[in-house]
Image (cartoon, helix red, strand yellow):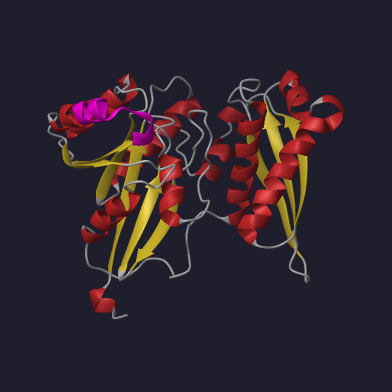
Amino acid sequence: MSEEKRSCGFVSIIGAPNAGKSTLINRLVGAKVSIVSPKVQTTRTRVMGIVNKDDTQIIFVDTPGIFTPRKRLDRAMVSAAWAGADDAEIILLIVDVARGKINAESRSIIEKLQKQKRKTLLALNKIDLVEKEKLLALAAEMQATGVFTDIYMISAATGDGVAALLKDIAARMPAGPWMFGEDQISDMPLRLLAAEITREKIFLQLKEELPYASTVETETWEEFDNGSVKISQVIYVMRDTQKAIILGKGGTQIKKIGEASRRELEDILERRVHLSLFVKVRENWTDDPERYSAWGLDFGA
């Protein structure tokens, strides 16, 4: 492939929490690069998913959901989301239409885009869960805002409409050399990806029991000659009561979390994984600048 014919650019995927951004990134890339959970506000860092289509490389940036921030971590996440939009050639707004209406957080994002006079692509997501008449009415309402150059109707979960969206985005990428190798699907370090996988399992298994007061860090990563890897991770929580929830009776809960995380890591890494999980209480981890640095967030946002 000739370098002269290549195109490359960034696409920032923004939206309210739980709009389906991470699911879409994983669908586009064809592999797990971003945490997916039915809970909101699960993506804390900007994750790059890389798609190579013919002579075009598209770098998708999955940003944290944009919502009204209340705490320091919230402010840093929202700041990272808007920074990702500023850096991209294309902004793609994902809106969940499953309930047949546009929620307040999505409307707030649209208002900010209007003020910035930023032309944006819109993907109405979860179209498999809404009646056609309501969907068409929502599309007409969004077109009337004047923000969107194109509106796509997709289901990130089923893949419906995603191929057409990807084709149009590829055609909009500017000419230029590729920034990543042909076989690379993400710029996320494996240690951070492994921590995100475990954090996802905590969300999925504990449902409403544990608030968003936990984080996971990969402390050691040891590779062996037989191809296997030994990973040691620490789950930080803010109170002893939360530690007890994660451990479960007789350690049953943390064992389930570890088994689910290990299985997925083995699928992603395509090798045997030995995973050890530990739980520690650190009351003020959300006020630790080092945590923010590891996630690529601005502590002072």
Of the pair 294 and 277, the residue shown nearer to us = 277
Rendered location of residue 47, percent (x, y): 46, 48
- The extreme front residue here reads 132
State yes or no: residue 260 in magenta: no
Question: Residue 238, relative to residue 195: is it above or below?
Answer: above
Q: Residue at x 48, y 57 (%)?
A: 187
Identify the image quadrant of residue 226.
Answer: bottom right
252 to the left or right of 41: right
Q: Is residue 19 above or below residue 107?
A: below
Q: Residue at x 36, y 46 (%)?
A: 160
Above or below for 161 versus 141:
below
Task: Mark yes or no: residue 175 visible.
Answer: yes
The residue at 34%/38% (across/down) is: 14
Q: In the image, residue 9 lies at what x, y percent?
A: 29, 59
Name of the residue lying farthest toward the right: 250
Residue range (magenta): 126-138
Position of residue 284 measured from the top left corner of the image (x, y, whole percent): 63, 25
